[in-house]
Image (tube, coloured by chain):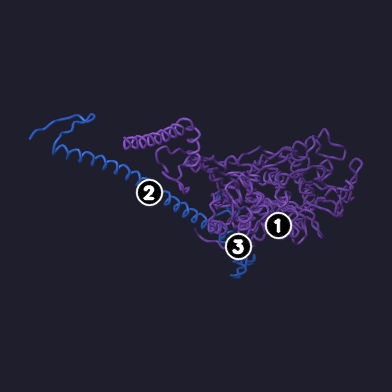
Chain colours: A blue, B purple
């Protein structure tokens, strides 16, 4: 079986039965590479969309979380709490005569007074 | 031959066709290259401006007072809209806006126009459901004040572009606003972003604004607002100011201002457009008033410091009036011979003026300025003024008498609160401040503001003597209604005549009623100033403003867990 080597472009290709098979294999490989490349690109685009959708979902959840925290903050305003305590629960401020001050032995009365900073 | 000719003709047509395609390609690729590239970039790339998140404002216990929310804004592409009238009518039903105004916004050849900014979530959902390709939604940041009107004038507000316009929002705008960023994203035919973070992805992240922690306490602020509002309603007053300060540090714990409140809700920074500028102005720093009798303790402090008088020295006030230059100044009530302590406790103008004359204008002026009157306190709020204090060399003959009883001098409520804080702080004047900390979200160390002494106004010995005098005001004098249950207190009442704008003389109907004091008297935790503008009917500071002081002191001291020092025997001693 004779084998002849020719140059097609810069790549050597064998003529004959084996040469034809190799050529087909080579072209197939190139097509496979191209398909892989294109497939990869398509996959990147698809993942890009997925990332964006997930980012959007994350943003929405963060937004909802923040809104709930602010709603909680709004509902805990002192004006609302006082109104609920007085009107709904019937709470009252104790009169002076009902207050008993518990003092530690040895403390010096008003010198214990706390400033807002000491709280 | 004929067949060959046909083949040649077909080849020629094909060759011409290829030549035409080639020429067109050359034209597109070479001649129109730059213009087409620019057009493609415009269509495929999107420069998205990234707004920085404005910093949050917290109270001293890190409770949110001003926050930024993400909300949707509606925009349109007027150049692409075929029928602006129909679209405007659809939008007006959702946005509750005038359809003519919307149509005007939609009828232009612009590529972008705001239709409505910062809309409600339900409105945004309905806009999305419209499914129009010519209108869209962009997320923007909106300032929101979860506690509504609480500390409205302190916080201030922002405009539509989140720029601070009043209050802390204005004075700390540069700190709160941060730096905007951008991202150059590629988009597909559907307008969706492709390749976030992919090659060639250019961006600059926005730098969020810093958070601010105030010295204000939202509970004390609520107490001050509630009690001031009650008094304003009871006396049908035109307005009022209440300041609560920590005397040892100069921190403002509550600051509330009410203007033109008759039937009007207090200023809510969530809807600033519903209020007049006078209603959001912080009158505690921007307005001066003649203090009246609440200024007398500073004459007393000066006279005691200079040993011009002794607290128990007897002063004859029986005449009921005194001539000062060309003016006769009278007492509100007839008094006999009073000790100097009782001169202040009963607020005798005659006795005060006699001591002031003895002290002399130069020495009196020295202490007026030492207590910080006549210059800005440096409080970090916009629009502070320095008040009106004339140099003693410009005083007329009557000035020493007038100034001693708090006339012919203009002070701001914040100056007055700071000066009383000096009396409650052993004689040292502290600089009042409202921001205690700036917090950097990047994790870098923030900025903390420490208490700042301005200087010593009088000695501790003088302060002790004066505190006893001011305690007598509350225990037996004009300020008895200020006595808080369970606590000792020291303070002074004031009933200052306002100037009648028509006549230029002191009005006999229009007054500023006030009370300033501190509690507990011997270890002050709070300094409280209450000023009520133009009460109707009863006008005396001891009847109008003193009860507000009492209510705020009782609730405020209990909230701060300050042990009562005046409970009259109901005290239970326990071992450690």
Q: Position of residue B107 (x, y in %)?
A: 64, 48
User: What is the spatial separation of the Cα atoms under label 2 and label 3, in whole angstroms?
Assistant: 50 Å
Q: Is residue B30 above or below residue A84?
A: above
* Residue at (20% x, 38% y) in the render: A23
Give whichever of B47, A41 is nearer the camera: A41
User: What is the spatial separation of the Cα atoms under label 1 and label 2, in whole angstroms?
Assistant: 62 Å
Extreme residue toward the front, this view: B1
* Residue at (78% x, 43% y) in the render: B410
Q: Position of residue B237 (x, y in %)?
A: 77, 57
Report helix, strand or loop for mark 3. helix
Q: Position of residue B267 (x, y in %)?
A: 68, 54
Q: Which residue is mark 3?
A: A80
Closer to us: mark 1 or mark 2?
2
Name the mark on residue B435.
Answer: none
Give whichever of B278, B293 is nearer the camera: B278
Report helix, strand or loop for mark 2. helix
Give whichever of B159, B73 is nearer the camera: B73
Q: Around disc 1, counting alpha carbons within 10 Å, would you say few (fewer than 14), some (14 to 19), or many (20 or more)?
A: many
Q: Is residue B361 left or right of residue B525?
A: right
Q: How many marks?
A: 3
Q: Around disc 3, counting alpha carbons within 10 Å, would you say few (fewer than 14), some (14 to 19), or many (20 or more)?
A: few
Are the residues flagged by discs 3 and 1 from a single subunit? no
Q: Which residue is mark 1?
A: B228
Q: Are marks 1 and 2 in contact (CB under 8 Å)?
A: no
Placement of the N terminus of chain B among the 4 image quadrants: top left
User: What is the spatial separation of the Cα atoms under label 3 and label 1, in whole angstroms?
Assistant: 17 Å
Q: Which residue is mark 2?
A: A46
Pointer 2 chain: A
Pointer 1 chain: B
């Amino acid at each position: 079986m004779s084998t002849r080597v020719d140059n097609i472009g810069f790549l050597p290709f064998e003529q004959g039965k084996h040469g034809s098979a190799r050529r087909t294999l080579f072209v197939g490989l190139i097509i496979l590479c191209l398909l892989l490349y294109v497939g990869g690109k398509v996959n990147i685009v698809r993942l890009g969309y997925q990332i964006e959708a997930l980012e959007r979902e994350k943003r929405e959840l963060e937004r909802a979380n923040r809104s709930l925290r602010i709603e909680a903050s709004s509902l805990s305003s002192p004006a609302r709490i006082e109104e609920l305590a007085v009107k709904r629960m019937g709470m009252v401020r104790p009169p002076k005569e009902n207050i008993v001050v518990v003092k530690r032995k040895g403390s010096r009365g008003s010198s214990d007074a706390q400033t807002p900073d000491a709280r | 031959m004929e067949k060959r000719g046909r083949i040649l003709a077909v080849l020629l047509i094909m060759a011409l066709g290829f030549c035409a395609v080639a020429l067109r390609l050359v034209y597109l690729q070479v001649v129109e290259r730059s213009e087409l590239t620019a057009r493609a970039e415009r269509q495929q790339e999107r420069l998205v401006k990234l707004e920085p998140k404005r910093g949050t404002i917290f109270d001293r216990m890190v409770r949110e007072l001003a926050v930024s929310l993400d909300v949707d804004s509606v925009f349109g592409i007027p150049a692409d809209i075929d029928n602006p009238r129909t679209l405007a009518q659809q939008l007006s039903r959702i946005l509750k806006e005038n359809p003519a105004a919307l149509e005007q916004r939609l009828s232009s050849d612009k590529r972008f126009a705001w239709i409505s900014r910062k809309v409600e979530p339900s409105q945004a959902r309905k806009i999305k459901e419209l499914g129009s390709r010519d209108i869209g939604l962009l997320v923007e940041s909106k300032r929101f004040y979860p506690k509504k009107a609480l500390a409205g004038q302190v916080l201030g507000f922002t405009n539509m572009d989140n720029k601070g316009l009043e209050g802390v929002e204005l004075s700390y705008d540069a700190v709160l606003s941060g730096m905007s960023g951008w991202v150059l994203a590629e988009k597909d035919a559907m307008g969706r972003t492709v390749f976030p973070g992919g090659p060639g992805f250019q961006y600059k992240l926005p730098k969020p604004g810093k958070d601010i922690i105030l010295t204000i306490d939202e509970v004390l602020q609520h107490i001050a607002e509630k009690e001031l509002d009650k008094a304003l309603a009871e006396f049908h007053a035109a307005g009022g100011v209440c300041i609560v300060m920590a005397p040892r540090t100069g921190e403002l714990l509550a600051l509330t201002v009410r203007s033109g409140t008759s039937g009007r809700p207090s200023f809510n920074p969530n809807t600033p457009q519903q209020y007049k500028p006078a209603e959001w102005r912080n009158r505690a720093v921007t307005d001066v008033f003649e203090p009246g009798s609440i200024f007398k303790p500073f004459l007393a402090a000066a006279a005691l410091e200079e040993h011009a008088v002794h607290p128990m020295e007897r002063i004859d006030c029986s005449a009921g009036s005194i001539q000062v230059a060309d003016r006769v100044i009278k007492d509100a009530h007839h008094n006999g011979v009073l000790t100097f302590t009782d001169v202040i406790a009963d607020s005798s103008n005659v006795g005060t003026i006699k001591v002031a004359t003895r002290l002399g204008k130069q020495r009196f002026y020295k202490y007026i300025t030492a207590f910080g009157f006549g210059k800005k306190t440096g409080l970090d709020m916009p629009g502070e003024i320095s008040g009106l204090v004339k140099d003693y060399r410009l005083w007329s003959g009557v000035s020493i008498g007038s100034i001693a009883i708090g006339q012919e001098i203009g002070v701001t409520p914040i100056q007055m609160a700071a000066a009383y804080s000096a009396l409650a702080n052993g004689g040292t004047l502290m600089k009042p401040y409202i921001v205690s900390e700036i917090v950097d979200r990047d994790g870098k160390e923030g900025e903390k503001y420490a208490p700042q002494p301005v200087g010593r106004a009088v000695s501790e010995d003088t302060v002790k003597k004066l505190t006893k005098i001011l305690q007598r005001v509350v225990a037996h004098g004009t300020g008895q209604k200020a006595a808080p249950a369970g606590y000792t207190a020291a303070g002074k009442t004031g009933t200052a005549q306002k100037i009648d704008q028509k006549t230029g003389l002191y009005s006999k109907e229009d007054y500023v009623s006030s009370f300033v004091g501190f509690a507990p008297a011997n270890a002050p935790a709070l300094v409280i100033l209450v000023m009520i503008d133009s009460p109707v009917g009863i006008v005396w500071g001891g009847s109008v403003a003193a009860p507000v002081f009492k209510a705020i002191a009782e609730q405020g001291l209990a909230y701060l867990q300050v042990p009562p020092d005046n409970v009259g025997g109901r005290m239970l001693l326990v071992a450690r």
